[in-house]
Image (cartoon, coloured by chain):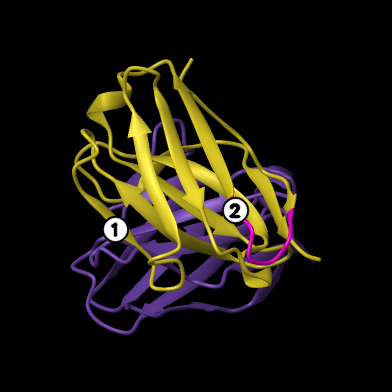
Chain colours: A yellow, B purple
Amino acid sequence: EVQLVESGGDLVQPGGYLRLSCAASGFTFSNYWMHWVRQAPGKGLVWVSRINGDGASTNYADSVKGRFTISRDNAKNTLYLQMNSLRAEDTALYYCARRLTGVGTFDIWGQGTMVTVSS
Amino acid sequence: EIVMTSSPATLSVSPGETATLSCRASQSLSSKLAWFQQKPGQAPRLLIYDTSTRATGIPARFSGSGSGTEYTLTISSLQSEDFAIYYCQQYNDWQWTFGQGTKVEIK
């Protein structure tokens, strides 16, 4: 079964840091671009970052550029999001998502991990 | 960044009727438009990509159309499980963006 499972979400103080993980199974992880998408409580979906299959190419939303770093370990079938200098507005449910082959959208999503930034 | 505008914000429909959801982009998408369904407490589910191609396992009552900056998701003969929030998403630009969502509720 194709599956993505996020972990690492927590309550953290403003200015703090956190690393999210996304464990992939059921498919050849290294063949796929991967993304992070977040959703603030009661709000819509916002794209955060993406990484290509070998990890050599990344992109970020302007709101997180310079603070977040996406990476992957294909040997461990795991995607990461290092989040530094966290702000209250980063509070959200963070989903990892797989890019549909040959298409720019996302066909498989995890269930999300919650990040709360508050003092 | 391409801005996506969904309408209406809320759509009240009776079971068995047809729901028509709209999405407008701030610039042409060259048909690189997807639709997602999200139910409370669940992750989004891909319904439609490339404007009109149904994703694996999606029933035929879901259909998409459009071009340029105007796109539509039509849900025919609404079933109880179709009441949810629907998001459009563009992937013509590398800064992937979503509409704010349309909630389809029971009338």
Q: In the shown orientation, is residue B103 left or right of residue A33? A: right
* Relative depth, front residue between A10 and A104: A10
Question: Residue B86 falls in which quadrant of the image?
Answer: bottom right
Based on the picture, tell me whether residue A16 belongs to the magenta stretch.
yes
Percent coordinates x, y for residue B30 in the rendering? 18, 68
| Dot 1 amino acid type | Asn
> Residue A17, which numbered label?
2
User: Which residue is at the front of the view, B4 or A7?
Assistant: A7
Magenta residues (range): A12-17
Q: Nearer the viewer, residue A106 or B35?
A: A106
Name the residue: 61% across, 59% down.
Answer: A39
On the image, numbered disc 1 is attached to which residue?
A59
In magenta segment, residue A113:
no
Indicate the chain on which mark 1 is placed: A
Residue A80: x %, y % from top left:
45, 39
Amino acid type, residue under disc 2 in the picture: Tyr
Badge 2 crowding class, 10 Å Cα cut-off, few under 14, some 14 to 19, many 20 or more, is some
